[in-house]
Amino acid sequence: MRRDTTFRVAIGVVSLFLSLTKKKSQNHHAKDAAEKYHDCPSSLSIHNQEGPGRWHLLSTGSYIACALSLDLACGGFALKIDNGILVGAAQVPSENKDDRPLGEISLIILHGISLPEGKFGGPHIKDLFCNTLDCEAHPDFVDLNGLRVSSHLVIRRGGEVEQFVSFLDRAWHAGESFYNGRADCNDFSIGIELEGTDYIPYTDSQYEALAYIYRLLRQSYSIENIVGHSDVAPERKTDPGHSFLWSRFLAMI
């Protein structure tokens, strides 16, 4: 779950309380909340109005619920890893997977993808990974006919996360690849696709989601490094491209 989603939920909760409770009251709760959450997104404000008709929260319980929502909104993502599943991500199971031959998970490979190229937000990435892509729907899809690929995760432009393959399984994302003298990187890697291109900057939300997920993966598995698809298949691939700022990402982890 992205913090934008939680933020909207928090706003809805606050709005509900306020709409039900147009009363004169002690406003120190609102003042305290405003001080405590001054680092929240600027579109959230708790107004401390004087005089009749100022707003207040219904009860201590309601205030606590609101505070918890605001904490989550300011704190980031609500994700965890449980038995190979990224709980909190949208689960879109792909059949394009098999067993890891050694059970090893030691590398993360970062990809960039958009279908059609430079177009974002459509269903085509999901369709490709789930073998339902209509390859006649766009000229960019012609060469994808019969292709069977997948990735463990896709991070959309808004930071939304979709999981197609359990981390415990081998996704088909790297193809012919080499890392540190080892071939077949799919055997021991996790593939993460960023919705984007080599030439369009990735979004703030994508960097934030990737950094958060990277830390979770490091806590759960024996991850030694994170590299680009271009690093393990330099003669075939260029993604995630120059538009991905490695220095920015590394500063976040």
Image: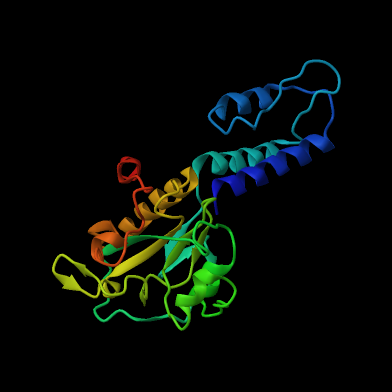
Q: Which residue is more in the foreground, 146 or 169?
A: 146
Say which residue appears at 48% left-offset and 46% top-offset.
Answer: 203
Say which residue appears at 42% left-offset and 76% top-offset.
Answer: 149
Q: Is residue 33 left or right of residue 183?
A: right
Q: In the image, is residue 19 above or below residue 2?
A: above
- Image coords of residue 61 (percent x, y): 69, 41
- Image coords of residue 4 (percent x, y): 59, 45
Say which residue appears at 66% left-offset and 39% top-offset.
Answer: 66
Q: How is the image coloured?
A: rainbow
Asked which quadrant contains residue 101, the reply is bottom left
Say which residue appears at 20% left-offset and 69% top-offset.
Answer: 178
Asked which quadrant contains residue 41, the reply is top right
Residue extending farthest front = 139
Q: In the image, is residue 131 above or below residue 115?
A: below
Q: In the image, is residue 3 above or below residue 123?
A: above
Q: How many marks?
A: 0
Residue extending farthest top = 51
- Image coords of residue 161 (percent x, y): 50, 59
Asked which quadrant contains residue 26, the reply is top right
Location of the N terminus by quadrant is: bottom right
Location of the C terminus by quadrant is: top left
Q: Is residue 68 left or right of residue 181?
A: right
Whether residue 93 is visible to the viewer of this picture, yes or no, is no
Q: In the image, is residue 20 above or below residue 79?
A: above
Whether residue 147 is visible to the viewer of this picture, yes or no, is yes
- Image coords of residue 129 (percent x, y): 48, 74
Q: Which residue is more in the foreground, 124 or 17?
A: 124
Residue extending farthest left = 181
